[in-house]
Structure formats: structure tokens, C-alpha cells
Image (tube, grey):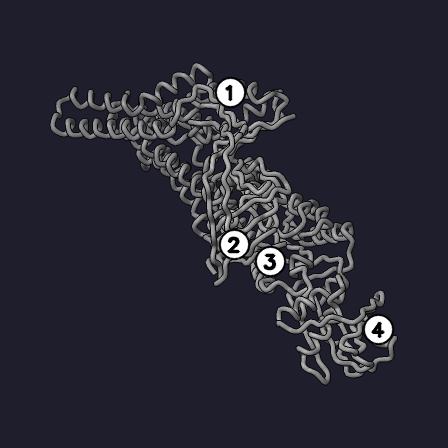
């Protein structure tokens, strides 16, 4: 089974797109087919090769919508470039970055970029089509105005000049629709918008409602044009914001720098990133210091300092000095590709509300046509009234019988929501995940890396008969040879304070208790309470009340003080939990840490429930209990051991700084690893789901109201019917994309 990707060009009807997707999925050779209308991308899993699939899909498209072009996408990239001498020197923070590069190289250039195989393809068809539509609408509008003027000046029983002008205007505006309607009838596609619009307007001509026939066609074409422009602009605004994929990278090898396609870069390659360039691939800094702008990924505008040994994510912008990065992940696995894949495949996991609309659309049009038939013939027969008014009302029903507003606006709302999330550093895997998140009643979190930073920091220093700085300096001198995380945090803290870290004359590690060292001729002890008791140190002045890991210090048998180390709570965690509670969300913490440590953090953050000392399978059991009591549950973790729990939750979320296994298993990824992204993701999901429901209610309600007005004889108008069709579609599109503006990047 292989996956193939196609672009379906000239497919501007969301309802037709839904029919095409359904018909392709029914083919015996197809395992699955998912079409995203907003990106025009069709992803198919099949036993057939790509070329065979393209032929079959083209036939399916031709049977439903005339003029659709199926374009294969096969990446077959080969690049090379010629570069002249390049020199680069960078001044940063008052000192030189120390790089002065001169390289001269030439290599063969062969470029076959993204092979595209098209059926009946003409270049720039989209732009030409848009221009043609504008010309057609302008010409038709001019003829329509001419007809209205002629009707005003000539008023005999039969106004031949105005009728001729109306017919010409109608043919200019409706010619393509009439032709498409005829072709689709021959294919057996009767209940489509082209046929229904043709019947409605020709019917208006038949009952001599010439201005309305042409006017309805004119405003239908204008509405379609604006609808197409709105969808395209929405798509571009989202895709431009998240398409951070690099085309090429600068790879250093053998003293030379070569520019190659990004997808050719391999793990272990050393790439150069100049100031102002976007970091192309996930990797580790091997040379240089700089600052990077991470706002494209995290929504955070404050520059982040980086140096040798630090990991960097693709998509960030190098703002200061030239750096070299070792590639840790190929392009296909880097963050920029994951983001773009999530956006482009927003409909891969279609939300239930979208599936409902797809099913509803299949019965909606036939139902409205049936109502129109009853209105035109049955009602006047039963009520013994004239046929003409009822036929006119029935024709207006046909105008609004296409469910495009519904079929288009729901996926567009989720598409926009996923785009809005990406701007805030929140990566939703698909629309189904977003819909599930909007229904979550309980949020369960891991402790380390989710609520806490996952790194040990000095939290408290208590010195006896010496200053705190002297105590820290002495302890760091004792601990500097140790690789234990606690020892490393003390040494790093001392260096951050620019304290003197002396070299020990001798060091002896006492397993499970601490370290004994000789510094400046003094016997120094750094360790736990057991170490001090074993060696007879008087620690009566020692206070155990402060939470954390305690490192006691003594010299020449005298107790000197205590340094408390702990995994510090993330600065935004308190606010995040508070926001969750404001939404009436139950909060819980599951951790493998000891109960004392876990309870201290839970009390600080005011988390509702805490379970500690858990193995991965125990976490899953506790999660199931919480789900049974509270309802739908989201779990957030970042470790490899969290993958099983993430997969078992209704919604699994991972911190972007976490393990790859956790990120792959998650439905939502918080790329900035901020705890406050949790309630923010829930708010975006809830808003998106609310907007999609608003669109459904609004679209159906307007159509029903127009029908009721017509059937009851209160008011019947084709102009109102046009608003109920293309006008409602436009309003739903605008409503769908407003989430992009509602959740702009926070500038801090």
C-alpha cells in the first residue's frame, strides 16, 4: 500500500469536492482518500502506482465536475549551484563572532524541481480563470444595466430591445453554467448547483421575470467570485504563516560550503546559518553564539540566546551571528515539516461535525428540490390558486438548494483554527483532535517537564558562620568533579554568580550519601543528613522544613549550612491552572516522583488531585478512573514513558521539548513547552468548534426562514434566495477565518 498526493485544480465547488472524495473512496483499489478543499490536496492510499491513480481520479472528477485538472506531485529534486567568493564577518554584542569565510567552488547544476504531471493542464489557469470571470461579470453587468435603461425608455407590450439585451446579458453570464449543466446531465449529475441555477433562471425567463433571471445570475456569479477569492486569501494567509520549509541549505564539508536541496541534507551534516536566515533543519549548535527569533514556532517574540551544544528547531530565525549546526533530523522529520503537514492535512482526521455535514449535504439538495416541486404544483392544485406565483417561489428555492455554504464553512473553520494555533506555538494534528479537545472535562498532567522545568535549580541557601556566597563557593568546589544533576546545578549556580570555584586537592565519593574532599587543606563534606550523622557532625541548627533535595555542608567537623535543590515550577504554571479552573476543568497530576515532592507542587499550583510513585501502566489505570468519574480527559506529558498514556487519553498532548515518542503519540504538541499553552489550546478548540456550529445554524436557519416566507406567501424573491445561497456562504467564510485574527501572536 502506497500513499500518493495530488492537487485538484479548478475545483471551486465544496459540494462537488465532497462528492468526488466519496466516489474515490468507493473504488475497490482505494484504501482511503482524503481531500482538503482549502489546500486542494488529495491524499490517497492505494495499491496502484501514482500514474495509474491519476488516470482513475481524473475520470472520477470528469464524471462530477467539468474542467477539474488532476496534478500529481512527485518530488524529484536535484540541485546544484555555482557560487562566487563569499565573505562574511559579523559583529555581535561588542565582539566579533570570529568567522571570516572565504570559499570558492563550482559544481554541476541539474535542476528538476518537484515534477508535476498534469492532465489537460494549462499554465496560470487559475489567474486566467479569475481574470476571465471578472471580464465576464463586467460585460454581463453592463448589458444588464443597458437592458434596465431600455426597459425604462421603451414601454410597449413587448419591449424587444430590452428583451434582447436581457438575453445577451444572460448568455454572457450564464453560458458556462448552462454548458456545465448540460454536460453534467449527460453524466447523470442532475442535482448540482449548475443545473438548479439554470432551471431557476430559465424558469424566470419563462414566466417573463427577465430582470430577476439576469440579476440572479449576475449576483450568483459575483457571489461565487468573492467566495473563491475569500477562500484563496484565507488559504494563503494560513499557509504563508506556517510554510517555513527551506528550499536549500548550506552544508560545510571538506573546507567547502555547498548549497544543496534541504531534503538532501543528512543527519550529521554541518550546516551554516547566516544572520537573517531561517534555521532550515532541527539540530545542535556546534560553533558560534547568537540569538534566535522563535516567534514563528512559539508565538514568543523575545529573542532566545543560543550557544554551542544547544538544540535548535527549524523555522526559527538566526538574528545575530553566523552559527554552525549539526543536523539531528532530516527535513521529513523536522519541526517545520510537522507543522506544515498538520495544516495541510487538517481534514485527515475529520471531526464528527464535518462528517455530519457531508451526510446532510447528500439529502439536502434532493429534499429542497422535492419541496420546490410541491410548492410549484401541489400547493396551487390543492389551494386552487394561480400557478405562476408558486412557480416563482419554487424557482427561488432552487437557487438556494446547493449546500456549499455548509460543506465549505465547517472544514474552513477547523483549518483556520489549526492555523491560529500554529501561530501561538500549538500544533493540532487534525480537526478531529481539535473537536475532541473542545469537549474535554478533565486535564491530567505529568509533573517533570510539564508543570516543572525538568532541571534542578538552587532554591534556598542557609549559611552558618559564613556568607551564603562563601558556602556556595565551597560546595561547588567540592562537587565540581561529580556528574550528578544536583552537583552540576550547584556548580552552574556558583559560576552564574561569578564565584571562585577552587580545585580540590582530593575527592572521595561516598555512595548514596555524598562527597568528601580536601580544599585548601580543609576536610569538606557535601551530602545528605545520613553522611553528617555517620561522621558525627552536629547538625542541630539544620532546618528540614524547606521543600527539595538538601545538600548539607561541613568543614573540619563543623556544620556550615545547607543548599536546597529542586526541580522548579514553570513560571506560567500557576496562571495556566487558574485558567483551566475558570473553564470548570478538573485538574490532576500523575507522576513517578515521590508523594512528598508531588504534593508540594500540587499544593502550590492548587491542582485538584495528585497521584505519585506511578509506573506508566499505573498512570494509564489512574487516567481511566478519572475519565470514568469526570468525562473526556486530556493528558499532557513529555517523556518516552508517557507515550502509552498519551495514546490512551481522549486527547494526548506533548511538550515540544519532550521525547520524540511522546510527540508522535500526541494529538496536540505545545512547541514552546509553556504550561499556559494548555488552556490556550482548549480555548482555540472551543472557539473553532463554536464557529463551525454557528455556521451550520446560521446557514440552515436562513434557508429555512426564506422557505417559510415563500411558502406562507409573506415574501418570495429570487434576490433573497441568492443571499441565502452565495451571501450566506460568504458570511460563513468570513466567520470561519475570524479566528485567525482573534488569536494573533502575543507580543511580549
Q: Residue at x 48, y 63 (%)?
A: 94
**Residue at the spot of label 1:** 60
Mark-to-mark CA distance, 4 and 1: 78 Å
| Of the image marks 3 and 2, the number of the one nearer the N terminus | 2
Foreground: disc 2 or disc 1: 2
Q: 59 or 170: which is nearer to us?
A: 59
Mark-to-mark CA distance, 4 and 3: 38 Å
Q: Residue at x 76, y 57 (%)?
A: 592
Mark-to-mark CA distance, 2 and 1: 48 Å
Numbered circles on residues, count: 4
Seen in the image, is 689 located left or right of residue 622? left
**From where the camera sits, is residue 292 visible?**
yes
Foreground: disc 1 or disc 3: 3
**Residue at the spot of label 2:** 292
Mark-to-mark CA distance, 4 and 2: 45 Å
Q: Mark 2 falls on what kind of element?
A: strand
Looking at the rendering, in which quadrant would you find the N terminus?
top right
Within 10 Å of disc 1 (Cα), the crowding (few <14, some 14-19, many 20+) is some
Amino acid at each position: 500500500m502506497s500513499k500518493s498526493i495530488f492537487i485538484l485544480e479548478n475545483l471551486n465547488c465544496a459540494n462537488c469536492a465532497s462528492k468526488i472524495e466519496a466516489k474515490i473512496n468507493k473504488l475497490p483499489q482505494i484504501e482511503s482518500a482524503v481531500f482538503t478543499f482549502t489546500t486542494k490536496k488529495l491524499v490517497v492510499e492505494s495499491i496502484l502506482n501514482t500514474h495509474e491513480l491519476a488516470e482513475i481520479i481524473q475520470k472520477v472528477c470528469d464524471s462530477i465536475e467539468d474542467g477539474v485538472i488532476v496534478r500529481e506531485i512527485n518530488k524529484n529534486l536535484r540541485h546544484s549551484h555555482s557560487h562566487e567568493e563569499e565573505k562574511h564577518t559579523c559583529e555581535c554584542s561588542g565582539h566579533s563572532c570570529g568567522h571570516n569565510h572565504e570559499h570558492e567552488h563550482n559544481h554541476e547544476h541539474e535542476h528538476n524541481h518537484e515534477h508535476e504531471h498534469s492532465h489537460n493542464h494549462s499554465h496560470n489557469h487559475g489567474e486566467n480563470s479569475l481574470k476571465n470571470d471578472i471580464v465576464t461579470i463586467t460585460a454581463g453587468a453592463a448589458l444588464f444595466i443597458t437592458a434596465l435603461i431600455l426597459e425604462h425608455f421603451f414601454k410597449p407590450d413587448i419591449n424587444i430591445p430590452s428583451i434582447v439585451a436581457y438575453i445577451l446579458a444572460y448568455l454572457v453570464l450564464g453560458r458556462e453554467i448552462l454548458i456545465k449543466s448540460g454536460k453534467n446531465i449527460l453524466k447523470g449529475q442532475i442535482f448540482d448547483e449548475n443545473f438548479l441555477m439554470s432551471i431557476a433562471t430559465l424558469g424566470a425567463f419563462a414566466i417573463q421575470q427577465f430582470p430577476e433571471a439576469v440579476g440572479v445570475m449576475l449576483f450568483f456569479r459575483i457571489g461565487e467570485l468573492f467566495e473563491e477569492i475569500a477562500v484563496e486569501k484565507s488559504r494563503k494567509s494560513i499557509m504563508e504563516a506556517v510554510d517555513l520549509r527551506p528550499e536549500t541549505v548550506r552544508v560545510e564539508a571538506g573546507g567547502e560550503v555547498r548549497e544543496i536541496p534541504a531534503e538532501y541534507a543528512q543527519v550529521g551534516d554541518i550546516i551554516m546559518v547566516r544572520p537573517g536566515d531561517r534555521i532550515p533543519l532541527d539540530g545542535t549548535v556546534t560553533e558560534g553564539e547568537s540569538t534566535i527569533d522563535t516567534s514563528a514556532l512559539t508565538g514568543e517574540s523575545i529573542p532566545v540566546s543560543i550557544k554551542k551544544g544547544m538544540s535548535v528547531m527549524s523555522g526559527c530565525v538566526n538574528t545575530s551571528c553566523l552559527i554552525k549546526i549539526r543536523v539531528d533530523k532530516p527535513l521529513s522529520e523536522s519541526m517545520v515539516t510537522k507543522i506544515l503537514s498538520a495544516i495541510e492535512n487538517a481534514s485527515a482526521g475529520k471531526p464528527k461535525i464535518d462528517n455530519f455535514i457531508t451526510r446532510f449535504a447528500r439529502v439536502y439538495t434532493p429534499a429542497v428540490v422535492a419541496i420546490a416541486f410541491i410548492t410549484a404544483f401541489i400547493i396551487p392544485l390543492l389551494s386552487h390558486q394561480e400557478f405562476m406565483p408558486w412557480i416563482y417561489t419554487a424557482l427561488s428555492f432552487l437557487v438556494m438548494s446547493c449546500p456549499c455554504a455548509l460543506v465549505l464553512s465547517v472544514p474552513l473553520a477547523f483549518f483556520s483554527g489549526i492555523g491560529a494555533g500554529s501561530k501561538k506555538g500549538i500544533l493540532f494534528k487534525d480537526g478531529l483532535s481539535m473537536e475532541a479537545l473542545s469537549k474535554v472535562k478533565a486535564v491530567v498532567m505529568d509533573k517533570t517537564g510539564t508543570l516543572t522545568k525538568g532541571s534542578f535549580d538552587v532554591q534556598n541557601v542557609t549559611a552558618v558562620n559564613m556568607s551564603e556566597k562563601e558556602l556556595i563557593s565551597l560546595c561547588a568546589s567540592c562537587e565540581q568533579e561529580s556528574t550528578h544533576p544536583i552537583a552540576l546545578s550547584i556548580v552552574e549556580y556558583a559560576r552564574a554568580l561569578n564565584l571562585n570555584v577552587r580545585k580540590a586537592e582530593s575527592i572521595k565519593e561516598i555512595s548514596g550519601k555524598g562527597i568528601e574532599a580536601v580544599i585548601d587543606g580543609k576536610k569538606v563534606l557535601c551530602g545528605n543528613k545520613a553522611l553528617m550523622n555517620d561522621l558525627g557532625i552536629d547538625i542541630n541548627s539544620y532546618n528540614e522544613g524547606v521543600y527539595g533535595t538538601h545538600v548539607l555542608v561541613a568543614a573540619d567537623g563543623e556544620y556550615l549550612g545547607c543548599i536546597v535543590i529542586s526541580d522548579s515550577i514553570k513560571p506560567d504554571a500557576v496562571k495556566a491552572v487558574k485558567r483551566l479552573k475558570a473553564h470548570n476543568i478538573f485538574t490532576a497530576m500523575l507522576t513517578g516522583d515521590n508523594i512528598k515532592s508531588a504534593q508540594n507542587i500540587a499544593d502550590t499550583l492548587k491542582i485538584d488531585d495528585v497521584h505519585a510513585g506511578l509506573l506508566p501502566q499505573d498512570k494509564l489505570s489512574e487516567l481511566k478512573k478519572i475519565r470514568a468519574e469526570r468525562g473526556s480527559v486530556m493528558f499532557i506529558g513529555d517523556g518516552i514513558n508517557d507515550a502509552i498514556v498519551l495514546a490512551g487519553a481522549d486527547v494526548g498532548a506533548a511538550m515540544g521539548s519532550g521525547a520524540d515518542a511522546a510527540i508522535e503519540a500526541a494529538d496536540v504538541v505545545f512547541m514552546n513547552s509553556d504550561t499556559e499553552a494548555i488552556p490556550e489550546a482548549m480555548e482555540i478548540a472551543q472557539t473553532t468548534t463554536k464557529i463551525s456550529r454557528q455556521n451550520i445554524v446560521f446557514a440552515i436557519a436562513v434557508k429555512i426562514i426564506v422557505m417559510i416566507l415563500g411558502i406562507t406567501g409573506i415574501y418570495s424573491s429570487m434576490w433573497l434566495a441568492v443571499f441565502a445561497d452565495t451571501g450566506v456562504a460568504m458570511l460563513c467564510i468570513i466567520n470561519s477565518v475570524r479566528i485567525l485574527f482573534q488569536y494573533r501572536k502575543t507580543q511580549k
